[in-house]
Amino acid sequence: MTATAATLLLRADAVTVQLGGNAVVQGASLTLRAGELVALVGPNGAGKTTLMRALAGLLPASGTIEINGRPIEALKPLERARAIAYLPQGHVFHWPMNVAAVVALGRHPHADPFSRTAPTDREAVSRALKATATEAFAGRAVTTLSGGERARVALARALATEAPMLFADEPTASLDPRHQLVVMDLLRRSTRAGGAVLAILHDLTLAARFADRVLVMDGGRIVADGSPANALSPAQIAKVFGVDAISLDTGEGMVPIARHPL
Amino acid sequence: MNNPNYRNLKLNAGLAVLVAALAFLSLLVGPAALSPRRVMAALLDGEGIPGIIVRDIRLPRTILAILIGGTFGLSGAALQGLLRNPLAEPALFGAPQAAAAGAALVIAFGLAGATSFAVPLAGIAGTMLAIGSLLAIAGRRASLTVTMLAGLALASFAGAMIALILNLAPNPHVALEIAFWLLGSLQDRSYEHVLIVIPFLIASWVTLGLTAGAFRALTLGEDAAASLGVDIHRTRQAVVVGVALGVGSAVAVAGAISFVGLVAPHLVRRAVGSDPARVMLPSALAGAALLVAADIVVRLVPGPVEIRLGVITALIGVPFFIAMILSERRLLEGNPS
């Protein structure tokens, strides 16, 4: 699936992150190309979120991280924000602002301090609302929405930046099966326009079905990087997650099913 | 998108008219009974006894109430924006108490006269210490419980420092003077007081005003805000400095006045759709209106001694705070961050 000709958006080499004296991420190397949906999987505490935050420039890290060929430290915060949209875990909204105002926050990296809302911002916001089917409650306070609706609003906020890269940390956590599929489908679609998505997922079935490539982390290291069939083989799953798994053919490809702990 | 801007403009204009009306009312109130017409005339020509009463006694007091009330409203809104918490208020974090401790130290030991720049500077230093320690103790996640406990500790410590200063005050007269000043009052303030606070207040407004945009992004949490290009570290520093400049200098001139920063943002929040940046200006105006109104009430209550302004704001503010705790209880119990 990965077109080698596709533009290289991000290259990370030997990234190590120290948190409180522990090397939470050790020597992680990876690439992200235009049009790719890459799943980052691994057991709890493997360092997935830490790696993602480091790649997004939110944590100091050693090693090299290059965005469009430029070292991440050389980018100004707003430049970096225009290149990478980051959707953290939990879909947090502290104030009961209305949905349209929340989604408009995604335009912050583009903000011109002298004119608050340029027409391009308004268009990007309405595109994001439309893509996530959140227009219907654009005027409602975000705190009054259900979990699935909030997840879509959170995603709309990240999409509104229209950054070439979107990093999503467990975008499907605590969502019902339908909304998990809706969110994965939205991520999939956003790569068709030439963007790249890096998503932390706990559901290996979703990872296998939607990702072009899967990165498996264990104990701070990337231990596999390849197609879902290779990276999520029953042998690999047994080794990393400590569960017995089988591969089932859904008719749309093979997906792993975890059966019982080893 | 134009609609909320227009609504905001209407809200701010309405509040500005309210402040102006209350300010005029404030010029009418005092022991000397003067008709509105005579007050107007005295204000314009400044002649005779009414001129002195209106221009030199009532006007500086009113100006200070507007400036200081506005500063408290703005500081409260800024702290709430930074901490993403509608219960944040400078007084709950020991800010006025710390400012009072700093200023009392200077006054008690005769280091400077009450109208020198040293008093607001000491107040600012005290506040900066309190708010800076609060943010340092509360840490990055700034959970409500830790923030409130840290505030309690700092307020208690500042209280102990004040008690120590009163305890060690070189003579009882000075101790009594400090005790009265601690209650908060705008009685007998002059243009000198206005002049020594105004540079600090303007610096505070500019600092906090320039930070407002960051509060909006912070509604998504610190990580998401940082990913949108907001410099979290600088935002925190700006709030510490802005609140310290405002609250520190205001307390140095008016004594400890609390809870305006809690009440003012709450009154206008719904009207601005809970937007933590848009709430700033209306909150400042509401704060100004509240303090001018409180300063009118103080002069209208009959009695041999004028009730102190800080006493009134606390008497109104604390029940209001309790009501807010009750209405936010679900949030406080369910969602610790």
Image: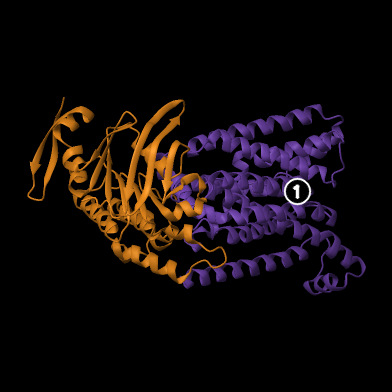
Rendering quarter of residue A128: bottom left
Task: Give percent across and percent down for residue A196.
Answer: 32, 53
What coloring was used for the rendering?
by chain
With A75 as the anchor, is A252 left or right in this view?
A: left
Residue wearing tag 1: B254
**Residue type at tag 1:** Ala
Q: Which chain carries label 1?
A: B
- The quadrant of the rendering that contains the C terminus of chain A is top left
Rendering quarter of residue B291: bottom right
With A119 as the anchor, is A218 left or right in this view?
A: left
- The chain drawn orange is chain what? A
Q: Nearer the viewer, residue B80 or A37?
A: A37
Task: Give percent across and percent down for residue B120.
Answer: 77, 45
Q: Which of B100 and A151 is in front in this view?
A: A151
Q: Residues within 10 Å of mark 1 (few under 14, many from 20)?
A: many
In percent of the image, x 68 and y 45: which residue is there?
Answer: B244
With B1 as the anchor, is B76 left or right in this view?
A: right
Residue, far front: A5
Residue, far right: B48
Q: Which of A189 and B72 is in front in this view?
A: A189
Is residue B274 something one can see in this rendering?
Answer: no
- Total labels drawn: 1
Is residue A84 something one can see in this rendering?
Answer: yes
Kindly state the secondary structure of the residue where label 1 is placed. Answer: helix
Task: Give percent across and percent down for residue B45.
Answer: 87, 73
| Relative to B314, residue B198 above or below | below
Rendering quarter of residue B26: bottom right
Task: Give percent across and percent down for residue A249.
Answer: 7, 44
Q: Colour of chain B?
A: purple
With B100 as the anchor, is A49 left or right in this view?
A: left
